[in-house]
Image (tube, rainbow, N blue to C red):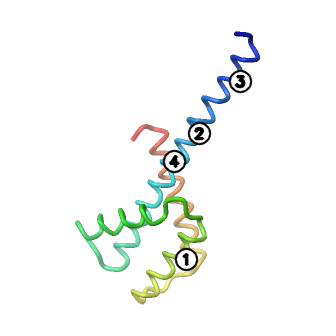
Amino acid sequence: MGEFENREEGFEKRFVVDEEIAFKSLARRNKLLGLWLAQLIGRAGAQADSYASAMVAAQVGASDEALFDSIKTALAQAKVEMSDNRIRRKMTEAMAEARTAIVAGK
């Protein structure tokens, strides 16, 4: 196998790893957001865990806008006021936290 093929194989392997990290990071972010949201709407313990797990399942393959809309709707139903900017900032923070944890192997 020539050097070109070795490099190509290396890029392909890196792509697979990057995609796996991205997928796991999204799922972890959604779980973190689910736990955060559960706390805001008054759920704790097993109810909070169940709520967060349901959020992860509901958001598989969905866009960030769909997640944002879901959070906004849940907050409105619970009569919790929060700005769009704060929700989006929390989404960004949760993604950074999730990605860091996944890359660190946690």
| SS at circle 3 | helix
Q: Earlier in the sequence, mark 2 or mark 1?
A: 2
Residue 63: x %, y % from top left: 59, 64
Residue 97: x %, y % from top left: 48, 52
Q: Nearer the viewer, mark 1 or mark 4?
A: 1
Q: Residue furthest top?
A: 1
Q: Earlier in the sequence, mark 1 or mark 3?
A: 3
Q: Is residue 81 above or below residue 36?
A: below
In which image quadrant can residue 9 be found? top right
Name the residue tied to disc 3.
8
In space, the residues marked 2 and 1 are separated at their CA atoms by 27 Å
In space, the residues marked 4 and 3 are separated at their CA atoms by 26 Å
Q: Is residue 59 rendered to the left or right of residue 19?
A: left
Q: Are marks 1 and 3 in contact (CB under 8 Å)?
A: no
In which image quadrant can residue 74 be found? bottom left
Q: Earlier in the sequence, mark 4 or mark 3?
A: 3
In space, the residues marked 1 and 3 are separated at their CA atoms by 40 Å
Residue 90: x %, y % from top left: 52, 66
Q: Residue at x 42, y 87 (%)?
A: 77
Name the residue tied to disc 2.
18
Name the mark on residue 99: 4
Q: Residue at x 70, y 10 (%)?
A: 1
Question: What's under tag 3, amino acid-wise?
Answer: Glu
In space, the residues marked 1 and 4 are separated at their CA atoms by 22 Å
Residue 103: x %, y % from top left: 49, 39
